[in-house]
Image: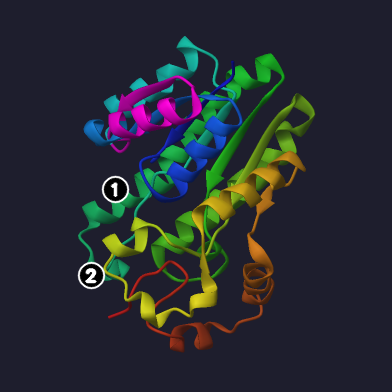
Amino acid sequence: MATALITGPTAGIGRAFADKLAREGFDLVLVARDEARLKEVATEISRRYGVACEVLAADLTEPDELALVEERFVTGPIEVLVNNAGFGQKKPFWANPIEVEEKQFDLLVRVVLRLTHAAVLPMIERGSGAVINVSSVAGFVQRGSYSAHKSWVTNFSAGLAIELHAKGVAVMAVCPGFVRTEFHERMGVDKTIIPSFMWLNADELVESAWADLMHGKAISIPTWRYKLVVAGARYIPRTLIARLSTVGLDGRRRA
């Protein structure tokens, strides 16, 4: 049976991917910091879908712990990697301690780079496999460090998809907008500011993303609403972006 490794699988998009892949028959390797919560999720998924769930408790921003997760790609075949772990900032770039900004950079960029590298080497040798990097529509708009990180994830994934297609390895960036998860709650975002029609369901998002992966897409943007947002983003003047609502596409309230 094939195995998938998912970072940040205890809630939201990561949990939706865990459920989807388990339904597809994949055994799972679940990676997050909270070992107790990981074990609860693993037990629930195993009971519900009859798949094996391995737990790897790790803070991916710590080099030694990240190395342990990288080693997992050597000890046993991983057919699908889902890079989902991440967090946002309540404050703008200049109001955060640089250490906090570095931690976000490490998780959203450096960890994606390293785990993708660890995953694709054995995938290339086997001639099969897939990497799904959870990005954001925020990456298509110039709004601070979070948007910059997600822009990198999307471009990195799309470029790698072209290079690895002939080797039998698929790479795709998933670019959601506002999704009903714990992400915005942890940031203290007032959800009433955001129109209800802009909110996405995590399970439906993942179903759409999986279908896009099966069709060979390198970038998955859910729903016509967000496809229009992305299509129009390149034409929005920076002066207008600066005057937009206090909540950006990354869900961060501006001071």
Name the residue: 52% across, 53% down. Answer: 135
Q: Is residue 201 above or below residue 212?
A: below
Residue neighbourhood size for the residue with mark 2, other residues' Cα within 10 Å, grouped as few (<14), some (14–19), many (≥20) = few
Name the residue: 41% across, 61% down. Answer: 146
Residue 38 is situated, as x and y percent measured from the top left of the image, at 30, 33
The quarter of the rendered structure image containing the C terminus is bottom left
Instruction: Answer with mark 1 or mark 2, whichever residue precedes in sequence.
Output: 2
Left or right: 119 as drawn, with respect to 191: right
- For badge 2, the amino acid type reads Ala
Residue 232 is situated, as x and y percent measured from the top left of the image, at 67, 77
Residue 40, magenta (yes or no): yes
Which of the two residues, 151 or 11, is positioned nearer the viewer here?
11
What residue would you read off at disc 2? 95
Name the residue: 57% across, 48% down. Answer: 206
Residue 84 is situated, as x and y percent measured from the top left of the image, at 45, 44
What residue would you read off at disc 1? 103
Secondary structure at badge 1 equals helix
Tell me which corner region of the image, top left, top right, bottom left or bottom right, holds residue 58: top left
Which of the two residues, 142 or 42, is positioned nearer the viewer here?
42
